[in-house]
């Protein structure tokens, strides 16, 4: 038992090392190709949002159809405070996250008392109302004309202007976010959440305060999205309400579905696959169907969503995990050890086995 | 064990992303690479599609005639799907991977504005097809050294409209705009310039782009008793509002934006469209122009070629793309492949007869058009007719 | 007098758009009652119905026939949707099913984009474009058609559910699926039928509104969402209440637009949704509701 623990600890450290090396080394791998770095930055920003959503949907079992609203809160808070009020970017980002958490708190209290369909509708309604706010509150957000001229962010006095610098920053956040999520899942909060997800009635009868935990995770996912929004704002220096409406919320949902909620990494995987699929489609579609444009992408992702939910509801992480399990059992190895190990995975979206 | 799984996933991720970017084969010496980004799908497709088709048609034409000084033109065009992130990523791709010499595009103002910081930093000549004046004249003072545009800004269109209103003596009007970036841009320009022309809005309202029935809002307009109503939107929602105005029995003249200069508007608004007046590019009434008009021949040739290739009428937006392409070609002829020389040549453009107007660029004016590039047009019997100008 | 005519005008605007919401909301309620699924693609049936009808009319098909054919086409599409996307996932959780319908909405819209592009299309009004004047307000004849058709549909469906064998069979499925099966009623066919009928109703709604505000690939989104709100306000399983809810939403929007400002119209509707959800989740006309099938 102890030896297994030491082996696991060793493996864990190795994996961590590999990850950090990959993070640091990637720019050299692609010889500073800024387009790839850009793509990775966008993936990173999306991964932050979708990791938060994975916690919410996979572990707390709550669906959210308006997550982009929090993404917007972070973006506009950072934009306004840094451009118009001259605040330092890190402070603005922190304020954004706190604001997002507050909004999540206020909205979450009534919303989490609802069940299933109504919960989904309520998050949708919330998303639309926030979008209307972004659109109408022109004094702060610039309305539909957008908000441009967002100043860059700086680390230790050095202003981040190049893609390489931003890449390191964003992925630092992503890794920190993943690490934090992993710890949440293994903690008491995580266990409570999984109990709730499995059966609310049972959990509640065991004394678990359902609403409190759901609310906490909702607020956390809002903060993830908000930080992502702030980073995005400083990167592109121009934002407009269309980035934070219902359609982007659905795209974040697609990322979580693709990645699956079998593991904390689901959000990252989903974001990466989504962006890469998009780029791949951009390259391939004009060759196969010269007249079709982006319309094809919409159909493609719609179909993908349906097919994945029918045949792979646990997403890619779930599928890989099942594959590995099958591999292990056929190889006849250490099934005993796995049985006694704590399982940190969540069920698929909304409960039920994948 | 799971850690190994995740490590594999991470490796897969890295490979996936790396696969996304294959650096383009550095072009052969006798090729000039032009990058383009249009919103050929998504919300702005009615604007972006004709733009993309115009440029593709022109590139083919020019290459058939030998390109520029014997070098073929290689067009690398991306569809940004009316999505800002796509525009940004495509820009990066064009600059870093495809290594283009110059860039055309950015159908919507939002996308152009997102692309500009990248382009200015990279130092590439860029001609935008979007209207916002922030594209060449930013209120935050940021650099626009490399950026030009061929679409008249709303500031120019509004001034044309206002001078028309003043001429007709319609000085207390109702202002209605669609609740999106297009509408609010027009509104801010109106608010800015109206006092100069002695025009006052007795009521200002917004209507949604998805409006089914604006009569509720129009009851308030009727009450305010304007001399004329200005409706600032694009075809679909403006058609609804225009119909509603006539249905409520409001008889005053209706003046609309250049956004309704399409057949679609006439179809949708039906009988109500007749009598509507709008400022528009000369392309809408090309065959009615006096022969002395310097643009007439260019316009008719473009119309003919476009209709032959694509089977539908070209629009003002396709025209902006036509202008951008030709301006760029002329600049490349002069500046060869040196980006700064191309840029300078662009800036020095004078008396270039284009589709959108006659261009006169300068260091302070990277659009080169003024209110004269537009004409007042009226819809009569379901057709666009040149109103006295 | 002025204030009165404005009020009447707003009333009629509200009733017009309310009747469109009502048709779509009816579809929601039927789908939900019989299958327990919230179909977020319901609004897109309106879009498909409208665009198909316009395409048929433009290629010379007689008007009334075109309407019938496009409704049938929508029903076929709905049926396919049920068989291909819903049936395989019928044991999945609510959340999954909702997301599947979102995926279907994307697919419908994407296909509409590919076939029809982004241009808006026009459809001629049913009985000429005139309007009538009442109490100083103006109502288009097409609006009258809308109101009449939606009420007629409701009455027709009411009769169907209460007077015919099939209708009663459907009701049985909702109340007690097990017993229904014992009586020889095929639940799966009911599910297919329910979604097909909902699709047909949605298509009709789109066809009726098209002469008033045009048709384009994205018209379904907002119509669907507002009809949703109507159905929730009325209580998801209660058809007459959903209709009342639809007219309520329509009127609220109209009055908000008339007396306040248009920009906040959407926020008002969704605010109503949130209010109802938080305060009275079973709808304003809460009745005994059965459990999900």
Image: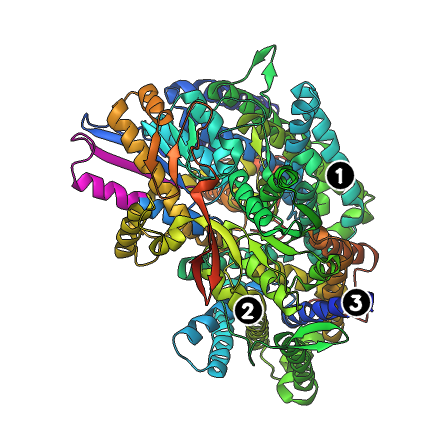
Where, by quadrant of the figure, is residue C161 drawn? bottom right
Give neighbour class at mark 3: few <14, some 14-19, many 20+ (Cα, 10 Å).
Answer: many
Where, by quadrant of the figure, is residue A336 drawn? top right
Residue at 67% across / 20% down in the picture? Answer: A90
Labels in figure, total: 3
Q: Are marks 2 and 1 on the same chain?
A: no
Q: Chain of mark 2?
A: C
**Way the structure is coloured:** rainbow
Q: Nearer the viewer, mark 2 or mark 1?
A: 2
B350 or B185, which is in the foreground?
A: B350
Q: Are marks 3 and 1 on the same chain?
A: no
Image disc number at residue B260: none
Q: Dot 2 lies on which element?
A: helix
Q: Could you tell me residue B118's position as x and y percent?
A: 46, 26
- The magenta region covers B55-80
Residue placed under numbered mark 3 in the picture:
C7
Image disc number at residue C210: 2
Q: Dot 3 lies on which element?
A: helix
Residue placed under numbered mark 1 in the picture:
A103
Q: Real-space Cα distance between discs 3 and 2?
A: 25 Å
Residue B57 inside the magenta-drawn segment: yes
A307 or B344, which is in the foreground?
A: B344
Q: Chain of mark 1?
A: A
Q: Could you tell me residue B317's position as x and y percent?
A: 41, 46
């Amino acid at each position: 038992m102890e030896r297994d623990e030491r082996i696991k600890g060793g493996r864990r450290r190795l994996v961590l090392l590999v990850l950090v090396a990959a993070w640091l080394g990637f720019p050299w791998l692609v010889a500073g190709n800024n387009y790839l770095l850009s793509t990775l930055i966008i993936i990173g920003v999306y991964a932050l949002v979708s990791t938060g959503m994975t916690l919410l949907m996979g572990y707390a079992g709550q669906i959210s159809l308006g997550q982009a609203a929090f993404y917007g809160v972070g973006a506009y808070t950072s934009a306004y405070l840094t451009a118009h009020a001259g605040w330092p970017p890190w402070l603005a980002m922190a304020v954004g996250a706190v604001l997002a958490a507050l909004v999540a708190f206020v909205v979450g209290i009534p919303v989490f008392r609802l069940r299933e369909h109504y919960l989904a509708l309520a998050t949708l309604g919330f998303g639309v109302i926030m979008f209307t706010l972004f659109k109408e509150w022109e004094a702060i957000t610039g309305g539909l004309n957008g908000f441009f001229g967002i100043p860059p962010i700086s680390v230790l006095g050095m202003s981040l202007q190049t893609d390489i610098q931003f890449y390191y920053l964003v992925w630092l956040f992503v890794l920190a976010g993943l690490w934090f999520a992993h710890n949440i899942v293994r903690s008491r909060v995580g266990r409570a959440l999984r109990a709730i997800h499995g059966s609310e009635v049972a959990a509640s009868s065991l004394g678990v305060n359902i609403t409190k935990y759901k609310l906490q995770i909702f607020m956390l996912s809002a903060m993830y999205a908000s930080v992502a929004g702030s980073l995005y704002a400083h990167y592109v220096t121009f934002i407009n309400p269309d980035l934070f409406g219902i359609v982007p919320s659905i795209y974040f949902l697609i990322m979580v579905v693709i990645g699956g909620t079998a593991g904390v990494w689901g959000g990252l995987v989903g974001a990466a696959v989504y962006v890469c699929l998009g780029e791949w489609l951009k390259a391939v579609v004009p060759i196969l169907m010269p007249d079709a444009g982006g319309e094809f992408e919409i159909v493609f992702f719609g179909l993908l969503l349906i097919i994945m939910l029918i045949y792979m509801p646990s997403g890619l992480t779930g599928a890989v995990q099942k594959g590995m399990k099958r591999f292990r059992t056929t190889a006849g190895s250490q099934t005993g050890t796995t049985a006694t190990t704590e399982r940190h995975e969540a069920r698929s979206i909304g409960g039920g086995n994948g | 064990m799971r850690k190994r799984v995740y490590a594999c996933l991470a490796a897969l991720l890295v490979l996936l992303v790396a696969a996304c970017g294959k650096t383009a084969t550095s072009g052969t010496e006798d090729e000039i690479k032009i990058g383009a980004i249009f919103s050929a799908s998504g919300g702005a497709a009615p604007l972006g599609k004709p733009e993309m088709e115009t440029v593709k048609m022109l590139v083919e034409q020019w290459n058939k005639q030998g390109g520029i000084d014997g070098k073929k033109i290689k067009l690398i065009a991306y569809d940004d799907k009316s999505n800002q992130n796509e525009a940004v990523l495509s820009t990066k791709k064009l600059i870093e991977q495809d290594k283009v010499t110059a860039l055309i595009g950015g159908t919507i103002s939002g996308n152009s504005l997102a692309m500009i910081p990248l382009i200015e930093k990279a130092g590439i000549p860029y001609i935008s097809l979007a209207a916002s004046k922030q594209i060449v004249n930013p209120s935050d003072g940021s650099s626009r050294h490399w950026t030009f545009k061929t679409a008249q800004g709303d500031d120019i269109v509004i001034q044309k409209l206002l001078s028309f209103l003043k001429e007709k003596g319609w000085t207390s009007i109702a202002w209605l705009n669609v609740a999106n970036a297009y509408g609010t841009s027009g509104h801010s320009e109106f608010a800015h310039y109206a006092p100069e022309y002695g025009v006052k809005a007795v009521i200002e309202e917004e209507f949604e782009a998805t409006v089914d029935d604006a009569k509720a809002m129009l009851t308030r307009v009727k009450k305010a008793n304007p001399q004329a109503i200005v409706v600032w939107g694009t075809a679909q929602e403006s058609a609804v509002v225009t119909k509603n105005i006539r249905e409520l029995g409001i008889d005053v003249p209706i003046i609309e934006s250049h956004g309704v200069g399409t057949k679609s508007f006439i179809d949708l608004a039906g009988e109500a469209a007749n009598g509507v007046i709008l400022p528009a590019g000369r392309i809408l009434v090309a065959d009615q122009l006096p022969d002395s008009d310097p643009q007439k021949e260019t316009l008719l040739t473009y119309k003919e070629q476009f209709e032959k290739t694509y089977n539908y009428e070209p629009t003002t937006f396709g025209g902006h793309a036509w202008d951008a392409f030709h301006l760029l070609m002329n600049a490349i002829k002069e500046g060869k492949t040196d980006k700064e020389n191309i840029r300078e040549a662009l800036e020095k453009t004078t008396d270039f007869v284009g589709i959108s107007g006659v261009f006169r660029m300068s260091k302070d004016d990277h659009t080169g058009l003024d209110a004269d590039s537009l004409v007042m047009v009226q819809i009569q019997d379901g057709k666009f007719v040149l109103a006295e100008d | 007098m002025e204030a009165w005519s404005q009020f009447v005008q707003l009333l009629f605007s509200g009733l017009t758009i309310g009747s469109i919401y009502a048709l779509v909301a009816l579809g929601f309620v039927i789908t939900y009652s019989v299958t327990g699924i919230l179909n977020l693609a319901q609004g897109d049936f309106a879009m498909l119905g409208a665009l198909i009808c316009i395409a048929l009319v433009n290629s010379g098909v007689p008007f009334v026939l075109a309407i019938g054919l496009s409704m049938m086409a929508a029903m076929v599409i709905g049926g396919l949707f049920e068989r291909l996307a819903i049936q395989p996932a019928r044991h999945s959780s609510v959340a999954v099913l909702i997301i599947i319908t979102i995926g279907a909405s994307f697919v419908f819209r994407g296909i509409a984009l590919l076939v029809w592009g982004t241009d808006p299309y026009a459809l001629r009004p049913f009985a000429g474009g005139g309007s009538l004047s009442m109490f100083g307000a103006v109502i288009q004849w097409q609006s009258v058609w809308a109101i009449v058709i939606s009420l007629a549909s409701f009455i027709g469906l009411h009769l169907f559910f209460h007077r015919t064998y099939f209708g009663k069979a459907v009701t049985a499925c909702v109340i007690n699926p097990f017993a229904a099966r014992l009586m020889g009623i095929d639940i799966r066919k009911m599910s297919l039928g329910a979604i097909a009928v909902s699709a047909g109703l949605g298509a009709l709604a789109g066809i009726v509104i098209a002469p008033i505000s045009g048709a384009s690939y994205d018209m379904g989104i907002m119509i669907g969402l507002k009809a949703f709100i109507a159905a929730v306000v009325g209580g998801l399983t209660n058809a007459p209440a959903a209709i009342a809810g639809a007219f309520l939403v329509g009127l609220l929007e109209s009055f908000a637009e008339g007396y306040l400002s248009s920009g906040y119209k959407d926020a008002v509707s969704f605010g109503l949704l949130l209010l109802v959800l938080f305060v009275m989740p079973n709808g304003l006309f809460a009745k005994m509701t059965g459990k999900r099938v």
